[in-house]
Amino acid sequence: MSFININGIKLHYERSGDKGKDVILLHGWGQNTEMMAYIANFLKEHFKVYNIDFPGFGQSGDPTETWGVEDYSEFLRSFVLEMNIENPILIGHSFGCRVAVRYAHKYPVHKMVLTGAAGIRDKRTLKYYYKVYTYKLGKKILSLKPFEKYKEKFQKNAGSEDYKNSSGIMRSTFVKVVNDDVTPILPEVKTPTLLVYGEKDEATPVSKGRLMEKLMGDATLVIFEGDDHFAYFHQGDRFNRVLEAYLKEDYE
């Protein structure tokens, strides 16, 4: 267990392995290093593996202001420079994939493995706008003094589970993160990429994986049948075998 101060924020990370290329593990929203530990333990024989807690999660400190995906990407860049890492392999889940894609769009990355990758925003329907404006109207009304006592309850009952489980600066950060759309930059990301999706993933459906595969310059899609958004975790042995096949030529 290690800590480093980057741009005034305490970052928790775990380093394993002492040879080979650098691998950075990027967990999903609301998760931490524990969700990626199985992967780190598998890869440490052939790589130097960095398993990090993003700011706002696990044992890392919170951002000092509302962050978007770009902010997390730049923070990752600061970590890479601080640790003297060059051309890392990025392995991410869900939110971590958003950060990986943004990072690879600007900086050198050897390979990526993205599982349950978030980042392609749904087309916004009338139902979406109705829901958003109803929420904003309700929030405005509850800001009036006679209704203030109901405001917290209203906010707790609104939004997704990830939103409800967030608080303080991380709640506004979540809103900014989920509104980020990486679709426009995908054709410009030429990093060799393996996409792994669960067949029954409802959070990031396989259709998003197929679109990513189509738009990215060098991407391959693998589907884990009968599994969901956490297919990489539920089928850890299978995921590691897929990693082994994809990264074999990089083994040291």
Image (tube, rainbow, N blue to C red):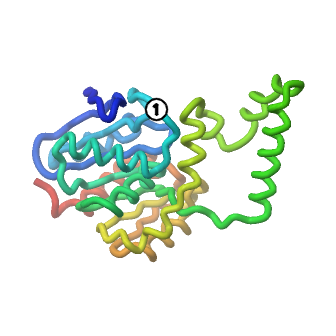
Tell me which amino acid carries mark 1. Thr
Q: Position of residue 42 (x, y in %)?
A: 25, 45
**Quarter of image, res 48:** top left
Direction from residue 179 to residue 19 in the image, left or right: left
Q: Nearer the viewer, residue 213 or 175?
A: 175
Direction from residue 10 to residue 226 in the image, left or right: right
Q: Nearer the viewer, residue 111 or 179?
A: 179
Q: Position of residue 190 (x, y in %)?
A: 32, 71
Q: Residue furthest right?
A: 146
Question: How many numbered marks have been drawn onto this rendered protein structure?
Answer: 1
Q: Residue at x 75, y 51 (%)?
A: 132
Q: Position of residue 197 (x, y in %)?
A: 47, 60
Indicate whether 238 appears above or below 14.
below
Q: Residue at x 38, y 50 (%)?
A: 73
Q: Nearer the viewer, residue 152 or 217?
A: 152
Direction from residue 204 to residue 185 in the image, left or right: left
Element type where label 1 sits in the image: loop
Q: Position of residue 187 (x, y in %)?
A: 41, 74
Indicate whether 207 appears above or below 163.
below
> Residue tagged by mark 1?
64
Direction from residue 88 to residue 71 in the image, left or right: right
Quarter occupied by the N terminus: top left
Indicate whether 77 appears above or below 164.
below
Local crowd size for mark 1, using a 10 Å CA cut-off: few (<14), some (14–19), many (≥20): few
Q: Residue at x 40, y 73 (%)?
A: 216
Q: Residue furthest front?
A: 145
Q: Residue at x 69, y 64 (%)?
A: 124
